[in-house]
Image: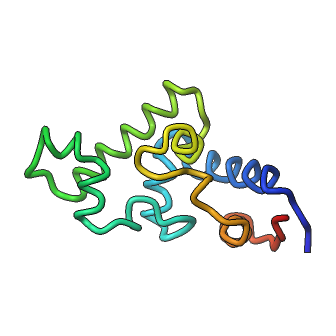
Amino acid sequence: MQSMTRAEAIEGLRKELVKLTDGDMSACKLAADRGIFCHGFARYNDDELKKLYSWIVRRRPKMTRAELESVADRWQMARQEVDELPVACDVQSKVHDTCRGWDDFSNADLSRFYRELTGKEIAVA
């Protein structure tokens, strides 16, 4: 089994996420849609998601969950562009407003995510 530093594992995950999202969606949407990685928006129940994106919900309180996820996805993508960062995890590691990005994950989590996205077993040290 290959051993990687935390930074190397994150860089590898980042590259895979960039490929999979292809600039068309955030890692949050990809993870939710495919049930992989951190599960993105799907890791939150309706009330939690509304609280995280309360500033969106205040403007449109009757929006459905799907509508909220769509707006949140576009917001994540816009933040990536504004901050010139490759994936939402990088943005959230910087701003910590909807999650803590890479800081949310243990080394064991990163190893598991790496296996999910690449098929390769690694140990993060």
Q: Is residue 59 above or below residue 12?
A: above
At which x and y percent is residue 71? Answer: 29, 43
* Quadrant where the image shows the N terminus: bottom right
Q: Residue at x 10, y 48 (%)?
A: 61
Residue at position x 23%, y 40% in the image: 55
User: Along the horizontal axis of the image, is 18 left or right of 79?
Assistant: right
Q: Is residue 16 above or below residue 1?
A: above
Q: How many marks?
A: 0
Give percent across and percent down for residue 108.
71, 72
Where is residue 124 shown, x and y percent of the image? 81, 65
Instruction: Decide if residue 31 is on the left or right side of residue 16.
Output: left
State the image coordinates of residue 120 (x, y, percent, origin top left): 80, 70
Colouring scheme, one of rainbow, by chain, secondary structure, one colour? rainbow
90 left or right of 16 in image: left
- The residue depicted at 37 percent of the width and 37 percent of the height is 75
Q: On the image, which quarter does residue 105 sit in?
A: bottom right
